Amino acid sequence: MAHQSFVYILASGRNGTLYIGVTADLSRRVWQHREGRQGFTAKYGVTKLVWYREFAEIDQAILFEKRIKRWRRAWRLELIEQENPQWLDLYETWNC
């Protein structure tokens, strides 16, 4: 049975500190980060949802998350800018 899951990138600002994660509930997970309940993201002010991708299976999402965590920073920035060149906070439109 397929379960919706997401790989996401949060940022402190344009070209700032990045956080990459995986979740089955994007809205709830990003809200947790924004509320400052997570160590790394709270410490560095990483609260803007700047990129995400949906996967049909959690296993696929986990593999992709691990892959992009090994990428060079420049590649991650390019991934974000391909879909979100203005580094908008996608959480605002995601929750609408």
Image (tube, rainbow, N blue to C red):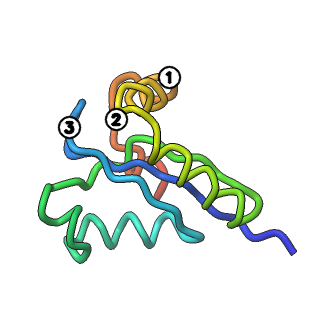
Residue occupying the far right of the picture: 1
Q: What's the amino acid at mark 1?
A: Gln
Distance in Å between CA atoms under marks 1 and 3: 17 Å
Question: Mark 2 sits on what residue?
Answer: 88
Would residue 44 appear left or right of 67 to someone viewing this image?
A: left
Would residue 46 appear left or right of 8 to someone viewing this image?
A: left
Question: Mark 1 sits on what residue?
Answer: 82
Q: What's the amino acid at mark 3?
A: Gly
Give the percent coordinates (x, y) of residue 46.
23, 53
For image coordinates 17% across by 66% down, the residue present is: 42
For image coordinates 12% across by 63% down, the residue present is: 43
Instruction: State which quadrant residue 55 falls in.
Output: bottom right
Marks 2 & 3, CB-CB < 8 Å contact: no
**Circle 1 sits in a helix, a strand or a loop, which is it?**
helix
- Mark before the other along the chain sequence, 2 or 3: 3
CA neighbours of label 1 inside 10 A, class few (<14), some (14 to 19), many (20+): few
Would residue 74 appear left or right of 61 to someone viewing this image?
A: left
User: What is the number of the mark on residue 16?
Assistant: 3
The quadrant the N terminus occupies is bottom right
Distance in Å between CA atoms under marks 1 and 2: 12 Å
**Tag nearer the camera, 1 or 2:** 1
- Mark before the other along the chain sequence, 1 or 3: 3
Q: Nearer the viewer, residue 61 or 56?
A: 61
Give the percent coordinates (x, y) of residue 45.
15, 55
CA neighbours of label 3 inside 10 A, class few (<14), some (14 to 19), many (20+): few
Give the percent coordinates (x, y) of residue 69.
45, 48
Number of marks present in the image shown: 3
For image coordinates 53% across by 54% down, the residue present is: 66
* 12 w.r.t. 5: above or below: above
**Tag nearer the camera, 2 or 3:** 3
Instruction: State which quadrant residue 14 falls in.
Output: top left
**Circle 3 sits in a helix, a strand or a loop, which is it?**
loop
